[in-house]
Image (cartoon, rainbow, N blue to C red):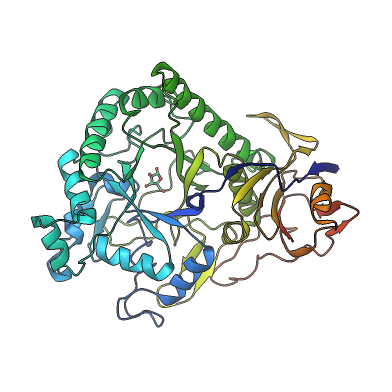
Amino acid sequence: MTVHGSLDPRSAFTDLDRRLFGGFVEHLGRHIYDGIFEPGHPTAGADGFRRDVIDLVAELGVSTIRYPGGNFVSGYRWEDGIGPRAERPRRLDLAWQSTETNEIGLHEFADWLRLVGSDLMLAVNLGTRGTQEAIDLLEYANADADTQWTRQRVANGRAEPFGVTMWCLGNEMDGPWQIGHRNADDYGKLASRTAKAMRMLDPDIELVVCGSSGSGMPTFGSWERTVLEHTFDDVDFISCHSYYQEHGGDAQEFLASGVDMARFIESVTSIADAVAATKKSDKRIMISFDEWNVWYLHNEEGGQNDKPAESGWPVAPRLLEDQYSALDAVVFGDLMITLLQHADRVRSASLAQLVNVIAPIMTEPGGPAWRQTTFFPFAITSRLAGERVLRVPIDAGTIPSTRFGSVPAVNAVATADAEGMSLFVVNRSVSDAASVRIDVSAFVREHGRDPRIAESHLLHEDDIYAANTLAEPERVGVRPLSDAVVSGGVLELPLAAVSWAAVRLV
Ligand code: AHR
């Protein structure tokens, strides 16, 4: 198929908040223990953190990292993770049926973030706990005063406040699986009370209230409306969570996942703006898409792959260790394109998760760390994305989707900055290659010359199920789009079926 589009560096619809390239680290499976923290590993420093993992997380280019959960946070006592390690309690983690040793807590995680170059985003427990414990944590982390909590913080080695800006008011409180699950009214009231108290302590924080844990939840829509009716004046963001997977070997349907994410974002934005209208307010609630990824949560029997295989409350069991294919990475790249296409309202997003647990980075105890296929679209998009986001109108054919109707076969977005533009594009068709022709004459008019391709990357495998594994860690990667050319104000990109690409134009 031949596909036409256009790219105009002056047509930005929004600036880009780099928090869109955030991540998520939960105390879950081998994420922390045996993932980022493995004392005794050949690359570990005196702090026990694996340097090979730090290097990969830094290369991934993750801005803000949400911590410590996830479902875990709804049973977590943050005080367990501070003070001398030897005195920290071991606890049952009900969410993941594991034992939490608490060797890593707020201080160690903040130290690790400094090493990877990312900022901290904290979630408070509104499952088993409430307003008091949330403001205790905020006081401990952010207060610049002389109190019992700040004295403890200083005694634990941190004289300066942590200065955490973004705070999540619980996690997925709409989900029946969540410890302390509540209905929208009860949660909305608790979130409002907690947010007000937190702001009295630190007016500069930004607060995220829980939206639905997926657009398929039975309460989706009414949950957002009720929760925002209670919290509209108290919060800055509402969260969206969404995970995608291929069902029943239907790759074409799976490749349409970006459309679902787009509709989810647009629905939540509309509900937030409708609540604003009823309150006669011009305030705009932003979206924190703080969990998104491909996740093979449901096995073909309809069960969930999220409990340890072994009984007896293991420490750091192998959980949610999905192996990603080239197909998964193409869908993943399209999800990133979709987030960028909504960057005026999605001002923060967190890839769930980072290491070993539905992750772009895998590790073996005592052994290597490697990049999964999804590593590439994230790292390249984060590195190449400029300050302003541009729409890329595309005139493409459509592909059929049972769930979403006819879906554009090619999807694209771009960014611009002082030096040039970056284009991100996906071919969602399982069968048809696309000859993509992008009109860049606006660039030619501004600069008096065609743009030059400074770099290009193609993610495509003839075997769409090819993956990187411990045995073959570099099976899938990206290669330059050697057939891409710019001439006479037109960028031409041949895109194989099921492929994702990025092109840097200067
Ligand atoms: O990311 C894995 C889990 O998915 C998180 O703990 C939870 O918030 C979501 O259901």
Q: Residue at x 34, y 60 (%)?
A: 317
Q: Is residue 346 above or below residue 109?
A: above
* Residue 210 in the figure: left or right of residue 297: left
Image coordinates of residue 207 in percent, x first then y, are: 34, 41
Q: Residue at x 16, y 56 (%)?
A: 79
Q: Is residue 105 visible?
A: no
Q: Nearer the viewer, residue 504 or 354?
A: 504
Q: Is residue 458 visible?
A: yes
In the figure, residue 236 lies in which quadrant? top left
Identity of the residue furthest to the right in this view:
488
* Residue 128 in the figure: left or right of residue 205: left
Identity of the residue furthest to the top in this view:
278
Image coordinates of residue 506 in percent, x first then y, are: 74, 61
In the figure, residue 5 lies in which quadrant? top right
* Residue 271 in the figure: left or right of residue 234: right
Image coordinates of residue 100 in percent, x first then y, are: 24, 59
Total marks placed: 0
